[in-house]
């Protein structure tokens, strides 16, 4: 005997909904307006809503308590054949024809155009939560990637793959301009404009910064910057950076900088001679630099990220406002740690 879910007592409905996964709740919510309204009575929470774009597919999931759960996958289908078995579903206030398939872990919605559907589904998933949930977008770049969908509330991103057009990163960060953290793992990155949105990101990790290194270093306005496989990078670029930080002309928000060269050797002594440095004074700062909780939360998924840095052999410089920072330079790496009041207090408590 079939029992109508809508006809069950309210408390029974809620109890049933609480046993469902987020994917199952989402599927119920798009079946009808009544079910959509009922599913909103369940208390759902998450750290982020995650969108992974690759080829002609978008995987949408949530992250909660360090765990990921796939909610739904959206696939593009260019032919009309799928319409023969299409189901009309309600996304927000619109009724849209989809074809549904099921995998071992979640469902697929198949549609002719994913780009226009993604913003609607993002808004629909947001409506299932009682508070705004930030979005995270991961893009795997290749020749089959469709256009970037317009999305609101994107706070973090990862870009992976091979870039054929030099302007892709400009377009990506222009499409999602208000990000707080970004991780870039691409083969080449092209040339950035001085007005690029990438410079305003608080937490930025670039695996292959290469020729972009000097421009990013010169224009960065955020808190955490990691540039790897850096090239076209000269000693004068580093000296200008330190002098601008000391004078507070730039980098007022910077907490940590790390640069790893693709090739070549850094002339440590030649750089230090041009700065007024002093050896570590135990009464002035701790030995260990601990990243802030926010930095760890934003960057911890990057390989080889360490939550603390040993500044034992680093030399110190002082900014015009009295802020202390430590410089570490070896053969092909630069480390720069800025000691905030909370950092110094943390060291005193060790």
Image (cartoon, rainbow, N blue to C red):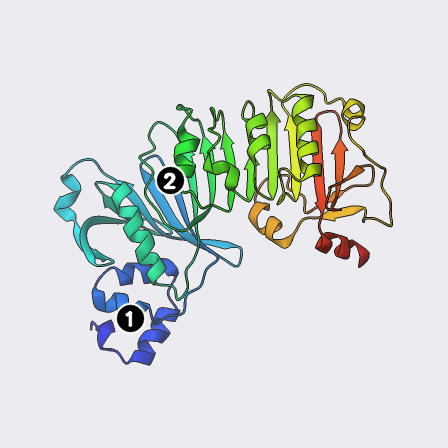
Q: Earlier in the sequence, mark 2 or mark 1?
A: 1
Q: Residue at x 30, y 47 (%)?
A: 118
Left or right? Give the position of 20 relative to 307.
left
The percent position of residue 20, horizontal first and vertical second, equals: 37, 65
Foreground: disc 2 or disc 1: 2
Could you classify mark 2 by the number of other residues whose Cα lies within 10 Å: few (under 14), some (14-19), or many (20 or more)? some
Q: Nearer the viewer, residue 54 or 346?
A: 346
Could you classify mark 1 by the number of other residues whose Cα lies within 10 Å: few (under 14), some (14-19), or many (20 or more)? some
Query: Does residue 208 appear in this view?
Result: no
The percent position of residue 43, horizontal first and vertical second, equals: 40, 69
Q: Secondary structure at mark 1?
A: helix
Asked if 329 appears above or below 151 in the picture, the reply is above
The percent position of residue 344, horizontal first and vertical second, equals: 76, 53
Q: Residue at x 76, y 22 (%)?
A: 267
Q: Secondary structure at mark 2?
A: helix
Q: Which quarter of the rendered picture does the N terminus lie within?
A: bottom left
Residue 141, picture quadrant: top left
Check residue 38 in the rendering and tell me which mark sits there, or answer none.
Answer: 1
Q: Nearer the viewer, residue 139 or 31?
A: 139
Query: Does residue 178 appear in this view?
Result: yes
Give the distance between the C-alpha atoms of the residues marked 2 and 1, in whole angstroms.
Answer: 34 Å
Residue 114, picture quadrant: top left
Left or right? Give the position of 63 relative to 73.
right
Asked if 291 appears above or below 268 in the picture, the reply is below
Check residue 139 in the rendering and tell me which mark sits there, or answer none.
Answer: none
Left or right? Give the position of 158 relative to 54.
right
Residue under label 2: 175
Left or right? Give the position of 347 relative to 157.
right
């Amino acid at each position: 005997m079939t029992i109508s879910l809508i006809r069950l007592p309210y408390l029974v409905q809620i109890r049933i909904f609480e046993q469902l996964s987020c994917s199952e709740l989402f599927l119920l919510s798009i079946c009808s307006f009544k079910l959509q309204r009922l599913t909103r009575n369940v208390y759902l929470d998450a750290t982020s809503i995650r969108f992974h774009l690759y080829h002609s597919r978008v995987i949408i999931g949530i992250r909660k308590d360090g765990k990921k759960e796939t909610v739904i996958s959206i696939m593009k289908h260019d032919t009309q054949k799928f319409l023969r078995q299409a189901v009309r579903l309600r996304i927000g206030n619109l009724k849209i024809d989809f074809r549904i398939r099921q995998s071992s872990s979640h469902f697929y919605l198949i549609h002719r155009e994913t780009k226009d559907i993604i913003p609607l589904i993002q808004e629909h998933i947001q409506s299932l939560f009682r508070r705004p949930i930030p979005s995270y977008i991961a893009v795997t770049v290749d020749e089959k990637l469709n256009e970037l969908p317009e999305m609101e509330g994107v706070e973090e991103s990862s870009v992976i793959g091979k870039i054929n057009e030099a302007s892709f990163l400009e377009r990506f960060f222009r499409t999602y301009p208000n990000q707080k953290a970004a991780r870039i793992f691409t083969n080449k990155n092209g040339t950035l404009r001085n007005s690029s949105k990438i410079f305003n990101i608080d937490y930025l990790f670039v695996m292959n910064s290469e020729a972009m290194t000097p421009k990013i270093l010169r224009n960065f306005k955020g808190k955490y910057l990691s540039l790897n496989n850096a090239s076209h990078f000269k000693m004068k670029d580093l000296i200008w950076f330190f002098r601008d930080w000391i004078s507070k002309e730039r980098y007022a928000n910077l907490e940590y900088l790390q640069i790893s060269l693709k090739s070549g050797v850094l002339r440590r002594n030649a750089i230090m001679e041009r700065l007024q440095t002093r050896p570590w004074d135990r009464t002035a700062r701790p030995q260990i630099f601990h990243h802030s909780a926010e930095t760890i939360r934003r960057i911890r998924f990057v390989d080889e990220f360490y939550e603390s840095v040993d500044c034992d052999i680093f030399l110190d410089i002082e900014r015009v406002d009295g802020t202390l920072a430590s410089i570490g330079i070896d053969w092909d790496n630069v480390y720069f740690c800025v000691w905030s009041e909370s950092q110094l207090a943390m060291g005193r408590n060790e």
